[in-house]
Image: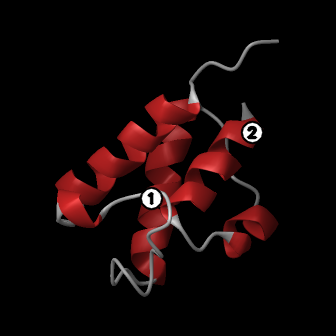
Amino acid sequence: MENKFSKEEIFEEVKNILIEELEINENDINSDANLFEDLDLDSIDAVDIAVRMQKFTDKKLPPGEFKKIRTVGDVVNAVYSLL
């Protein structure tokens, strides 16, 4: 079965969330950017991203998987693996 979204589409959605909701500078966002160290997010911001991605994909990220996420690329890969 083909995934509903490509990794590029998921990345763009994560990037939009970071820019629009969390006011992160677009130039700071790349796959290797650490959500907590590079982008200065906190756990509440991370939960907000997870909720927004759940709405985007209609899939819920399991808590165990969610705890492993450290970078923007981790978010993309975790969401992609759900599809």
Q: Nearer the viewer, residue 73 or 5?
A: 73
Question: Is residue 15 depicted above or below 42 in this figure?
Answer: above
Q: Residue at x 28, y 46 (%)?
A: 16
The image quadrant that residue 4 belongs to is top right
Q: Quadrant of the C terminus?
A: top right
Q: Given the image, on which type of amino acid does mark 1 rest?
A: Ile
Residue 33 horizontal side relative to residue 15, left or right: right
Question: Residues at badges 1 and 2 in contact (C-beta under 8 Å)?
Answer: no
Instruction: Name the residue carrying label 2.
Output: 82
Earlier residue among tags 1 and 2: 1
Position of residue 71 measured from the top left corner of the image (x, y, whole percent) = 54, 68
Question: Is residue 35 depicted above or below 12 in this figure?
Answer: below
Position of residue 31 measured from the top left corner of the image (x, y, whole percent) = 48, 57
Looking at the image, the residue that sits furthest to the top is 1
In terms of secondary structure, where does tag 2 sit? helix
Position of residue 2 measured from the top left corner of the image (x, y, whole percent) = 74, 13
Position of residue 46 measured from the top left corner of the image (x, y, whole percent) = 47, 70
Residue 10 horizontal side relative to residue 39, left or right: right
Q: Residue at x 57, y 26 (%)?
A: 6
Q: Which residue is drawn at 45% across and 74% down?
A: 35
Instruction: Name the residue carrying label 1.
Output: 49
Q: Which residue is drawn at 70% across and 74% down?
A: 67
Callout 1 crowding tier (Cα within 10 Å): few <14, some 14–19, many ≥20: some
Q: Nearer the viewer, residue 53 or 40?
A: 40
Tell me the CA gap for discs 1 and 2.
15 Å
Question: Is residue 74 depicted above or below 81 in this figure?
Answer: below
Q: What is the total number of numbered labels drawn onto the structure image? A: 2
In terms of secondary structure, where does tag 1 sit? helix
Callout 2 crowding tier (Cα within 10 Å): few <14, some 14–19, many ≥20: few
Q: Given the image, on which type of amino acid does mark 2 rest?
A: Leu
Question: Is residue 1 depicted above or below 33 in this figure?
Answer: above
